[in-house]
Amino acid sequence: MSTVPVIAIDGPSGSGKGTVAARVADQLGFGLLDSGALYRVLGIAAVKNGVDLENHGRLAELAQQLEIEFGKSGPGSVWLDGQDVSLQIRTDTGSELASRVGAIPAAREALHARQQAFRSEPGLVADGRDMGSVIFPDSCLKIFLTASPEERAQRRYKQLIGKGIDAILPALLRDLKERDLRDSQRPISPLKPAEDAVVLDTNDLSIDEVVEQVMDLARARLAG
């Protein structure tokens, strides 16, 4: 068992886990793993390379071959094969592909070791859907962020519009509910809190308030 501390932040799409994880990692001086980006990149790469998502064996091979770089052109940037795909993977298409790829056991298995390899000194903040339950079950702190589908869809809408990406709120809500259902019912690593996770309902909390709560918990666990 590794002695490098991991703080796992899981939750459904739009729960704010990515923003919270990035800010917590920055305040602690820890590394950051955006596991969702790996699945988004794999989905985009599959389309780019003409790989049928039903061809699970080929998809697993592609997952092992991906040339991915994080933060090359700034915080939150993601590069695939030397190209910046940061905006591309955050589109609704990127989300849809990530959810479909995430339901494929062979793809999840192929990305398992790649995710664990991000664990290094002085520590790691990992965000996703199964960071605390599957990838880093020995995390010193496991957080599960949640909010209503309506609140999460509204957040997603504002995020996309703010980036200049066209979005339709009712469509976002419908897609989000479909993804929640698919993610929670998949046979491998379904979306659910780890048994020892701290569940935070973020409906009535600002990002600053959520980060503050997570930081308080993190400092207590790391000091203990």
Image: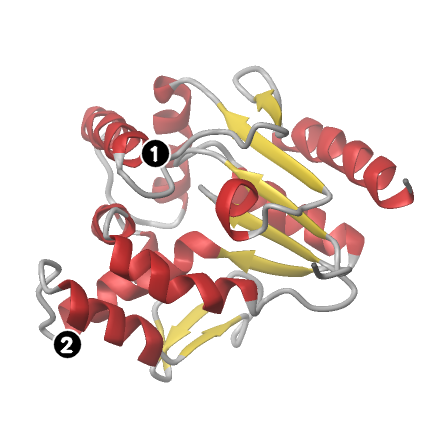
- What coloring was used for the rendering? secondary structure
Residue 100's place in the image compared with 66, above or below, is: above
Which residue is more in the foreground, 113 or 102? 113
Q: Secondary structure at mark 2?
A: loop
Left or right, residue 9 beside residue 97: right
- Frontmost of labels 2 and 1 is 2
Q: Is residue 86 visible?
A: no
* Residue sitting at x 52%, y 17%: 203
Mark closest to the chain's N terminus, 2 or 1: 2
Residue 119 falls in image quadrant: bottom right
In the displayed orientation, state which residue is furthest to the bottom.
Answer: 82
Q: Is residue 127 visible?
A: yes
Q: Nearer the viewer, residue 100 or 86?
A: 100
Mark 1 surroundings within 10 Å by alpha-carbon count, few (fewer than 14), some (14 through 19), many (20 or more): many
Image quadrant holding the C terminus, namely top right
Mark 1 — residue?
157
Q: Quadrant of residue 2?
A: bottom right
Q: Label 1 amino acid?
A: Tyr
